Amino acid sequence: MYNWARPRDLSHYERCKHYHATFYQHVEALSLTPFAPRAIDRGLSALFVALVRLAGKEFNGNDQAGRIERHHPYIKAAIDAICDRAGLVGDAETQKMVKQALEAKLDIWLSKAQNLQGGGILKYQIEQKDGLTIELLKSAGRENWQDFTCLNSLRNVEPTVGLILQDQVPNDDINRLPEKMIKQNQN
C-alpha cells in the first residue's frame, strides 16, 4: 500500500516509468525448456484445467469439475490452444507428445468424474474433508506425484539438491586436468 505522504512511496509515483521498466530486475531467471518431457509432466495438468475452468461459467465453480464432457467446445479449444503453442515452440513430434498427454489427462479426468460412488462430488479442490468429495487437483509436496498434481511455483519443478562443501581439494590430480584437456584437443 502506497501512501502519498511518505517520500519513498511518493517517489514510486514520480518515477513510475522507471519502476515499471525495471520491475523484473531482481527476479531470478528460470531455465526451463518449454514442452520438455519434464515440464509436461509437471505443468500440463494445471494449464489444461485452468484453460477449461476459466473459459466460461460451465466448469468455473469448484464443484463443477465433475461436469466435464469429452466433446465440449472448451475442452477442444484448450487442447487445440496448448497443442498449437507446442507446435510453435517445438516441432511436430513435440506437438504430438503434448496431444497424447492431454488426451490421457482428459481420460483420467473423465474417469474420476464418472466413477463417483454414493453421491460423491468431484471438486477441483477440497475445502473440508467430508468423505464424499473427491479432489481433482493435488498440491505438490503433500503426497507422491499424481496425474493432477499442480505446482504452486516454478521452483517446485525439481526437488532441492543438498550440496556438501569440503574445505580440502579432492585427491585426484586436479592440477593435470587442463593439461589432459589440451592433449585431447590436439588429437
Image (tube, rainbow, N blue to C red):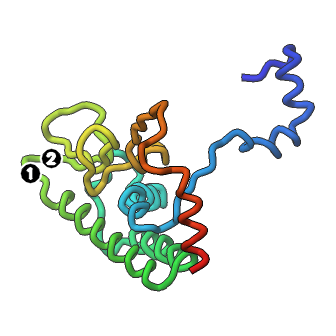
Q: Which residue is mark 1?
A: 117
Q: Which mark is residue 120?
A: 2
In the rendered image, residue 180, in percent from the top left (x then y), is placed at: 53, 65
Left or right side of 125 for 177: right
| Residue with the most extreme top position | 5
At 30% from the left and 33% from the top, the residue drawn is 127
Q: Is residue 58 visible?
A: no
At 74% from the left and 42% from the top, the residue drawn is 25
At 58% from the left and 59% from the top, the residue drawn is 178
Quick check: 4 above or below 81?
Answer: above
Name the one closer to the observer, 26 or 179.
179
Marks 1,2: beta carbons within 8 A? yes
Name the one closer to the observer, 85 or 111.
85
What amino acid type should be assigned to the residue bearing mark 1?
A: Gln
* Dot 2: element: loop
Quick check: 74 above or below 152?
Answer: below
Name the one closer to the observer, 116 or 46.
46
Which quadrant holds residue 183? bottom right
| Residue with the most extreme left position | 118
What amino acid type should be assigned to the residue bearing mark 2?
A: Gly
Quick check: 90 above or below 172?
Answer: below
In the rendered image, residue 117, in percent from the top left (x then y), is placed at: 8, 51
